[in-house]
Image (cartoon, rainbow, N blue to C red):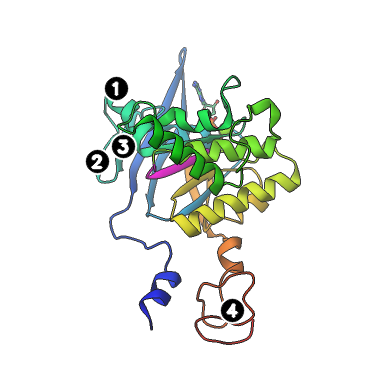
Amino acid sequence: MSELTQKIEEPTPKTSEPVLKIEKLIKNYSMGKRNVSALNGIDLKVNKGDFIAIMGPSGSGKTTLLNVLGCLDTPTSGMMALNGKDVAKLPEKKLYSIRRNELGFIFQTFNLFPYLNARENVELPMESTKKSKEERRKRAKELLEMVGLSGREEHRPHRLSAGEQQRVAIARALANDPAIVLADEPTGNLDTKNKHEIVRLLGRLNLDQGTTIIMVTHDSQVASHAERILFLSDGKITEEKRGLHLVKKKLMCPHCGSRIQPSDERCPSCKKKL
Ligand code: ADP
Ligand code: MG
């Protein structure tokens, strides 16, 4: 087997060291005299290149879990290691730097700055990095091209459709080359066509760039695009299922599993007719 074939067959290599590891994670909120147990002992390993969907009924702890994973909130107890570094009890200043350098966020409501254009929105998270102005501009343009928005760089959010705004938000999330992208209902505010386009884009980023993605969704169609689907109930992971990773499935030879292009008539690896 050629080197190229091997590379293509395993576009998202899994390393033995998980990018994120959490053990016995607990998050309680106190509401006056009442104690709400939002996360009730979560154990999870996320490998580099994973594409994970988190599902569960309202109030099951999905947002709390994503916020804790995103270092936006600290757990009450338990262990959480990001790239082997214990982050569960770090002070806010350190968490801020982890959020900025190692994590990317995508929100249901896009959260773009309305007075900045698409390129400036993508440049923003790079502002306090070592990159020069030119480097930031170049990277923002490349990222916008990657999400299919070439020629729209100078448009402000109000001149972009909802689907295009979410593409800008995805480009922004990738700006500092994060270890993990966290998305809370990324398709929640989109119509059916845009919903499918956005989740396919996430699938392609995962497949082509090896981006590690954890996304919360209510929508089982959206979740089916992921490779692992976790079900939360009362602050616990009660089940894990295999998703279909539809983008990967579509681009895999049904005979030998090698990577194919949509235009291929024969598999470039096993030469069988597709
Ligand atoms: P989901 O996103 O699955 O709907 P959440 O993570 O938002 O669930 O909430 C899980 C539980 O924690 C719920 O009972 C909710 O009321 C409670 N909760 C979430 N955030 C807070 C908070 N800031 N203060 C108090 N209780 C909270
Ligand atoms: Mg929620």
What residue appears at the point 30 percent right and 33 percent down from the top-left corner?
88
Question: Badge 4 is on which residue?
Answer: 254
**Please, what is the three-letter code of the amino acid marked with disc 1?**
Lys
Q: Earlier in the sequence, mark 2 or mark 1?
A: 2
Q: CA distance from mark 3 to mark 4?
A: 43 Å
- Cβ atoms under marks 3 and 2 closer than 8 Å: no
Instruction: Choose mark 3 or mark 2, whichever is in front.
Output: 2
Q: Magenta segment, which residues?
A: 177-183
Q: CA distance from mark 4 to mark 2?
A: 40 Å
Please report the residue visible at 56 percent of the width from the left and 23 percent of the height from the top: 116
The residues bearing labels 2 and 1 have C-alpha atoms spaced at a distance of 16 Å
Cβ–Cβ below 8 Å for labels 3 and 1?
Answer: no
Residue marked by disc 1:
93
Q: Nearer the viewer, mark 3 or mark 1?
A: 1
Q: Residues under labels 4 and 1: Cα distance? A: 49 Å
- Could you classify mark 1 by the number of other residues whose Cα lies within 10 Å: few (under 14), some (14-19), or many (20 or more)? few
Q: Dot 1: what SS?
A: helix
- Quadrant where the C terminus sits is bottom right
